[in-house]
Image: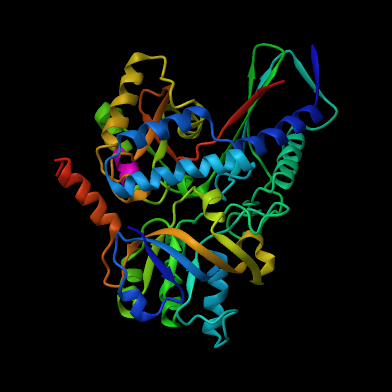
């Protein structure tokens, strides 16, 4: 059964999510990839503010295709999260709790998630046309020069995600594979 | 000598860039559906259902299947009896990529310098491979390549003593290391032999071959089957969430090599394995 999740991702809400949960996410999220994260972390290091309020925020690691006429946004599936590992702990330290992407994370990211009650959601990599359907509004808010990598505010409705790593550090990538191997007698 | 205008090549490249990014090849669709029918885990089935729904949306609405519309890998097999007139060949190909990525609302994902970065803004240059073949035609193949999977690819220069077992272990090692990162279920392209550079190209070419085809040499056809089966016993599953479907296809291409070596390259692709061909 899918859980309906309404953002913002408060600490209380984060604690109710567990690795392996299928969720339908609704609310405001922000888009950023490595180039945008680098700029945001540099801004924080200089003591400057971010282009959005990071408290309880969720960041979607995505660089969409350009919108066709009449579209809110082009295809918008997740990019590989590992490229944001260098920046994710800093982002969590200022309150950005949710991350949406795909692929493995480093142990230091998982440690930061435990410390700051972060949640790592997986969107289906390569399902950009489907995921775009859940995006009802898209607004460019910073770093326009980065093109596809610019920072956008999105309104999403019932975005189909799976909790990959929860705030206790449980990891579906490990659990899912282990379960499969146990059930199919290859361990 | 048949004359072909450079502008004709531009037009075909433009069209193929768009079509390859919107419409998944039938062999790939078929393999995904077959795997969906065999999966038993709830999460795995759900992921494959979403993947099927995704390519159906892309088909129906003519939109990119995936937002990573890739670097444009362009393969030209040029008949030796063809004379290309009216312009520079690589410029003609780049112009096709430029127009295709603009008109098709495709993402521009190319930086002009690998270290100093900076988006070129039009997805050029193409990664262009030309081959001179007999005949008076040009066969154009465009294979947009995403980098989530490209980044998980590897090449290794084996000693011949490593033998077939060395190759088998390496293929599994690459897939296992890739894990959830390349958006499994993946397609695996394997190149064996040649030189360092040719070997990597073989692996890329293996990804351009339909996944319902086999290597013409029964020895390698059997190895393709065996390795696909072994990969699907790893349990990585769709998106890495666990399951039977870690790869939907594996193709091997080979070349003769040096007495002292046995290069092997493994090029990983995701379930959005795109390629489209047209003959001029």
Secondary structure character of the magenta stretch overall: helix
Quick check: A185 left or right of B193? left
- Give the quadrant of residue A39: bottom right
| Residue B30 screen position, x and y as percent | 44, 29
- Can you see residue A32? no
Q: Nearer the viewer, residue B108 or A58?
A: A58
- Can you see residue B41? yes
View extreme (bottom): residue: A47
Q: Nearer the viewer, residue B50 or B110?
A: B50
Name the residue rendered at 79%, 33% in the picture. Answer: B88
Is B256 above or below relative to B263? above
| Residue B213 screen position, x and y as percent | 44, 21
- Give the quadrant of residue B8: top right
Q: Is residue A178 magenta?
A: no
| Residue A97 screen position, x and y as percent | 42, 75
Is A145 above or below relative to A91? above
Region of the chain picked out in magenta, as a range: B172-176
View extreme (right): residue: B86
Is B226 above or below relative to A89? above
Q: Is residue B173 magenta?
A: yes
């Amino acid at each position: 059964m899918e859980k309906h999740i309404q953002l913002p991702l408060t600490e209380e809400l984060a604690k109710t999510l567990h690795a392996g949960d299928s969720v339908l996410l609704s609310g405001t999220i922000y888009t950023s990839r490595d180039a945008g994260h680098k700029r945001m972390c540099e801004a924080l290091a200089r003591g400057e503010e971010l282009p959005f309020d990071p408290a309880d925020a969720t960041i979607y690691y995505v660089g969409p295709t350009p919108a066709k006429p009449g579209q809110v946004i082009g295809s918008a599936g997740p990019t590989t999260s590992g490229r944001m590992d260098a920046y994710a702990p800093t982002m969590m330290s200022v309150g950005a709790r949710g991350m949406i992407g795909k692929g493995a994370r480093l142990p230091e990211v998982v440690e930061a998630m435990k410390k700051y009650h972060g949640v790592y959601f997986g969107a289906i990599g390569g399902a950009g046309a489907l995921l775009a359907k859940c995006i009802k509004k898209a607004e460019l808010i910073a770093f326009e020069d980065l093109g596809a990598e610019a920072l956008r505010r999105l309104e999403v409705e019932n975005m189909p995600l799976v909790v990959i790593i929860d705030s206790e550090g449980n990891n579906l990538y490990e659990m899912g594979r282990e379960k499969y191997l146990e059930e199919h007698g290859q361990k | 000598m048949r004359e072909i205008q450079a502008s004709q090549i531009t037009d075909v490249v433009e069209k193929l860039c768009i079509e390859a990014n919107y419409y998944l090849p039938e062999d790939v669709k078929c393999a995904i559906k077959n795997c969906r029918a065999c999966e038993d885990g709830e999460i795995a089935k759900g992921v494959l259902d979403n993947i099927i729904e995704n390519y159906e949306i892309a088909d129906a609405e003519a939109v990119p299947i995936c937002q990573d519309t890739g670097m444009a890998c362009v393969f030209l097999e040029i008949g030796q009896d063809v004379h290309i007139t009216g312009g520079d060949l690589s410029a003609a190909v780049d112009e096709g990529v430029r127009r295709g990525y603009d008109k098709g609302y495709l993402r521009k994902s190319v930086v002009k310098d690998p270290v100093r970065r900076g988006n070129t803004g039009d997805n050029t240059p193409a990664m262009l491979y030309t081959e001179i073949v007999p005949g008076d035609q040009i066969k154009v193949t465009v294979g947009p390549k995403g980098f989530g999977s490209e980044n998980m690819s590897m090449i290794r220069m084996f000693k011949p003593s490593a033998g077939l077992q060395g190759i088998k272990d390496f293929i599994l090692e690459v897939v296992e290391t890739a894990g959830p990162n390349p958006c499994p279920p993946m397609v695996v392209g394997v190149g064996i032999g040649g030189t360092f550079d040719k070997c990597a190209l073989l692996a890329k070419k293996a990804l351009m071959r339909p996944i319902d085809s086999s290597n013409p040499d029964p020895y390698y056809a059997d190895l393709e089957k065996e390795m696909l089966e072994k990969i699907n016993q790893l349990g990585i599953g769709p998106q890495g969430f666990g399951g039977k479907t870690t790869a939907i296809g594996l193709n091997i291409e080979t070349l003769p090599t040096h007495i002292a070596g046995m290069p092997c390259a493994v090029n990983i692709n995701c379930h959005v394995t795109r390629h489209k061909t047209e003959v001029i």
